[in-house]
Image (cartoon, rainbow, N blue to C red):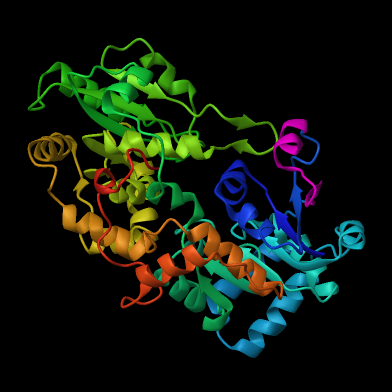
Amino acid sequence: MRNIHLTIQTGLAERDLLRCGVVEALLAHPEVRVVLLTPAHRDPIFRAEFEGSRVVVEPFHMYLPTTMKWRLMTRRWRHVRNRELLRWWLRLEEALIPAHAYDEAFHRYPPALVVSGEPLRPGDNTLVRAAHRHGVPSLGSVRSWDNLLKHLRTRPDRLTVWNPINHAEAVELERYRPGEVAIVGAPQLDPYFQPAPALSRAGLFAQLGLDPTKRLLLLATSSFTYESDQTYLVDLLVEAIEQRRFREPVQLLVRLHPSDNIGPYLKYRHSPHVCLDLPDRWSRRLGWTMEVADIQRMAALLRHTDVMLNFATTVTLEAAICDTPTLLVAFSTVDPEEMERYVVGLHFKMHYKGLVERDLVPIAWNQEELVDWINCYLADPAVYREQRRQVVRDWVHFTDGQSAQRLAAAILRAAGLEAPVDAGTRRRGDAETRGRGEGSTEDPPRVSEVPVSELS
């Protein structure tokens, strides 16, 4: 039996790796056992859902970098270019990391490979250090399109990433060799391209308590900081609704970011113009998470939304898959300094830089532009449609719903195993990629054109 050790630090990693098909694809290989290293190892609900004959749950040993380790990482990101110097520098950093945290787990289940489920975070440093001590290869699954630009705090031997842009970032920013980085797509976006139960607009609106006679605005909030107050935008939109500044009657659904603070939004619970959509799956150890059904419901929500507004989050990519008109908000009437620092000064110059500079998503820089863009979209949802297709081509990349399978195959290869391939899946994949390279870069269909009724 070949043991693959996989870390699950957060509910987002639980969603991406455990609920979206990656572990199932690994277990399709009869010689694989998956060892989940997680802070939820004592959570009976987690163990009941995921533990099995070839899935064991073990403690996760968190690592928090010392001041010296942070300084070394920062200087490496800024200055280290030469590969020989990089090798020496990484050895120096690793010497500061505890070496024996996983000795017991490695003794019970000798690993063929260790996988960092979130190399953006520093917590997996102890696992990678243990792997190097024992001569075990390591791989990091970069779980979001923005992670490499934020710099990885854990340095495994190899990486998997979403798209060619991320591949270039891994080579340029993290100094990986091109062959050490595999492009696999985003498992958490697979449900957007897979069959799902139908959920009509009327059914979804009934679930959410929305008025079916009104158009829908969706505000997806950002993590920001707990000091920031994003309710100013809700207030502006409610004011515009009450003043009848929109060309048609509209209502607002506020979907909170899992890291946002719920408290400031509770005042809208009884508003006739606002509905709150709050995360409802929460683990005491891992935080907010989602099941595939929750992702499918999110896709249905985007499909039935008339205009989606956000501050520079990944929901822009999800909306692009669904061809949902999208507007970025880049102003604040209550905290302009924080908006300038966090959205304009940071995100617009980091992972959103390509979208902003290429004008792939319109931006509202003030209240008048906010109302004007919403009215423009209400009049013609096709505005910026080609740009949304370009967002999918460049950042989502794969549109076949098989990214979990590709990630699992990359993990198996790194463990010295070959992925079992279903003949039908092989034929479909060959047909989908033939003539256009490894990535699925043809124009993605609008969700309503996919032969399913609800996607996520």
Q: Residue at x 84, y 73 (%)?
A: 133
Please state, as top left, top right, bottom left or bottom right, where the N terminus lies in the image. bottom right
Question: Relative to 127, is 321 on the left or the right?
Answer: left
360 or 441, which lies in front?
441
The residue furthest front is: 423
- Percent x, y of residue 138: 70, 70
Q: Residue at x 69, y 79 (%)?
A: 89
Number of marks in picture:
0
- Residue 239 belongs to magenta span: no
Q: Residue at x 22, y 64 (%)?
A: 358
Q: Can residue 72 be seen here?
A: no
Quarter of the view holding residue 387: bottom left
- Percent x, y of residue 12: 57, 45
Question: Relative to 217, is 255 on the left or the right?
Answer: right
Quarter of the view holding residue 157: bottom right
Classify 354 as above or below 384: below
The residue furthest top is: 270
Q: Can residue 178 be seen here?
A: yes
Question: Relative to 93, is 369 on the left or the right?
Answer: left
Please state, as top left, top right, bottom left or bottom right, where the C terminus lies in the image. top left
- Percent x, y of residue 392: 31, 58
Highlighted range, magenta: 44-61
188 or 383, which lies in front?
188
Classify 40 as above or below 347: above
- Residue 54 belongs to magenta span: yes
- Percent x, y of residue 412: 66, 69
